[in-house]
Amino acid sequence: AQKITQTQPGMFVQEKEAVTLDCTYDTSDQSYGLFWYKQPSSGEMIFLIYQGSYDEQNATEGRYSLNFQKARKSANLVISASQLGDSAMYFCAMRGGRDYKLSFGAGTTVTVRA
Amino acid sequence: DAGVTQSPTHLIKTRGQQVTLRCSPKSGHDTVSWYQQALGQGPQFIFQYYEEEERQRGNFPDRFSGHQFPNYSSELNVNALLLGDSALYLCASSLALPRIGQPNYGYTFGSGTRLTVV
């Protein structure tokens, strides 16, 4: 079974600053994938970034980067140059190599201040 | 390229009633998963359908059932509704066998159906 832990229920960040969202995971699978999603108030889950367990490089997608520390089982999301439109709920999720489902954390609410 | 479409967007039902939610997957996707998201929580996996069969199921009672049609669209049925079934129900589509260059497994989510049970 996979377990995702997000310990920050809410965060405030100043516009144009960077913010790091924490995510730790637990799995017995050797092969797995880690995902970050953004959920605005509209409800839709928007895919941000993906990291495979065997990827040697940390994933980056525009202003999003994933700080993957396999030995510590952490996959923190860094959002650089925050924008007002980044205000949303952010979820870390995982899919085990033998699994079809995504397991989600409890989420972190990010509020960007002007 | 149409994304995942869910209907209806909002629904109010009475305890004990039955409800059917619908999902049309993203064009080219053949697998549909359903998730329940209670207010302030992360989504919980209900089940996944592929080739019109339930391929994997989460920890949900038999009151939750589903169906996938030959055109890959899907329905989620919930019988004997309880107050605790009030939630946002999300549908996600994907490819059963992700193509090379699609390492993220290509999950695409809809905007969800918000179900309120009174």
Image (cartoon, coloured by chain):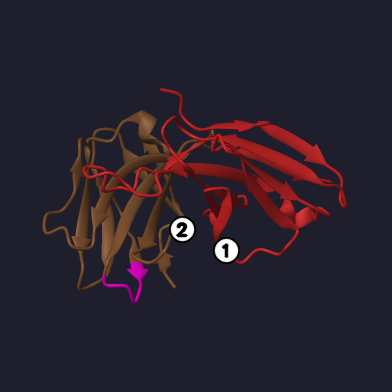
Chain that is coloured red in the picture: B
Please provide the residue range marked out in magenta: A25-30
Side (left or right) of A52 relative to B46: left
- Identify which residue, A40 or B47, lies in the foreground: B47
> How many numbered circles does the render carry?
2
Who's the residue at 27% across and 67% down the image?
Answer: A31
Residue at (75, 51) in percent of width and height: B78
Identified by mark 1, the residue type is Gly
x and y, in percent, of residue A28 in the image: 34, 77
On screen, residue A10 above or below A42: below
Q: Which mark is residue B77?
A: none
Q: Position of residue B6 (x, y in %)?
A: 60, 33
Q: Label 2 near label 1: C-beta < 8 Å?
A: yes
Please give the residue where the numbered disc 2 appears in the rendered image. A101
> Can residue A43 be seen in this snapshot?
yes
Give the residue at mark 1.
B58
Query: Chain A is which colour?
Result: brown
Instruction: Give me the chain letter of mark 1.
Output: B
